Every structure is written in structure tokens, then in C-alpha cells.
Amino acid sequence: MSPTHDPHLDTAQAPDGTAVAQSRIAKALADQPFFSSMPATMIRRLAAHAYNAEFAAGAYLFREGEAADRFFIVRTGTVRLDMEIAGRGRVEVEELSCDAALGWSWLFPPFQWHLGARAITSTKVIAFDAAVLRTVMAADPVIGYELMRRFAAVMFDRLQTTRRCLTESGAHLPFAAVAGPWAGKQTRAITLD
């Protein structure tokens, strides 16, 4: 389900909106923990590629396996992350709420979501166009570094939470081979039980 644009959040001109809307988005971003201590010039540049959106309760922001074409900052509401486990169906991994950064799969090929994200309550987000941000990051290594540093912390936290969830649920999952020259060679299967 696609997000709806909320006129109360200055979304009428998303994502290439008016200067006023982008200024309001930049102010909202500056108040978010994910962007704390980021220089105002960087925040304004990123805000130019952001827009406000709303998801109704029950709507998916994205589904596991779909193209990862955006990332989100949750402003209000609750989002549940889940994943498909063979023989068990969808398993809840984590719930995120206000101020959470959501989505990092857009950073790495093949740019597909590794988890699903569904709004549990009506949820308002600031959304970013991932393809544009990858271009900005490549053109400006300082912005690229600042975003990667922040997303590394999000990824670490999300992976630790997923590990705890799977361990507590008693899931028996084989270690998945990781693609890419940096991953090394898989020598054995690892299970979580």
C-alpha cells in the first residue's frame, strides 16, 4: 500500500517540494536523534530529497524481498518489523516508534528489503528517495560518511535485536551465505539453537 500525503505535514509538494515545505522538513530532521550533531547545511541538502507521508494502521511501508527504494524517519506511530521463517510464517522482530530510523537495505545491492515493515498504528514518517541519496552520497563523501556512520549504528542495533529475537524464539536457521568478495568463504552452517 502506498503512503498518503498528509497536508498537515507540508507534503503537497513532495519530494521536490516548495522551499517552505523543505525548510519545515529540515527543521523536523534537525530535531531527530538520527540527525543530531549533523551540520545544518547537510540537513538542508538531505531535506531537499525528503517528503512527509502517512501510513494507515495495517499498511506495509515495505515488504521483505521488495525493492528498497526509500528510507524513513518515524515521526509518530508504531511500525512492526517482521520476517518470514519457514514453517513458522511471519515472525515479529522489533517494534519501532517515534524518532526511529527505518530501513538500511537501500544502501547495498541488490537493494531489496531484508525484513517487512507494517504500521501497527497510523504512522507519520519523513521518507527519503534512496536512489537520489545514493547519488548525493557518492558525489559528496562527507555526507556519505555521516550517513553511513549513522546507519552503521542502526544496522548494529537492528541485527542485535534480530539475533535476540530469533534466539529467544528457538528458531533453527541455517547461516545464510553472504554474497560479495568481502564476505569470505562459508565453511560451515551455523544454527541459533
Image (cartoon, rainbow, N blue to C red):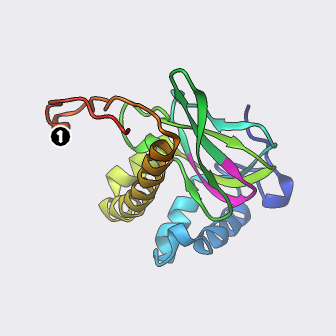
Please tell me which residue lies in front, 164 or 109. Answer: 164
- Check disc 1: other Cα within 10 Å, few if <14, some if 14-19, many if 20+: few
Q: Main secondary structure of the magenta part?
A: strand
Residue 73: percent from the left, percent from the top?
61, 57
Q: Quadrant of residue 96?
A: bottom right
The residue range painted magenta reads: 71-79
Q: Residue at x 52, y 41 (%)?
A: 169
Residue 129 screen position, x and y as percent? 55, 45
Q: Is residue 124 left or right of residue 172?
A: right
On the picture, is 32 further left or further right than 141?
A: right
> For residue 81: magenta?
no
In this view, the residue farthest toward the top is 87
The quarter in which the N terminus is drawn is top right
Is 180 situated left or right of 192 in this image? Answer: left
Q: Residue at x 51, y 63 (%)?
A: 45
Residue 156, quarter of the rendered image: bottom left
Which is more toward the observer, 189 or 140?
Answer: 189
Image coordinates of residue 117 in percent, x first then y, are 62, 41
How many numbered markers are drawn?
A: 1
Residue type (three-letter) at the residue carrying disc 1? Trp
What x and y, as percent, mark residue 191? 33, 34
Q: Residue at x 25, y 29 (%)?
A: 189
Q: Looking at the image, which residue sits at the far right?
A: 8
**Could you tell me which residue is drawn at 38 percent across and 38 percent down?**
193
Reply above or below: 48 against 66: below
Above-or-below relation of 106 to 145: above
Q: Which residue is mark 1?
A: 182
Q: Which secondary structure, mark 1?
A: helix
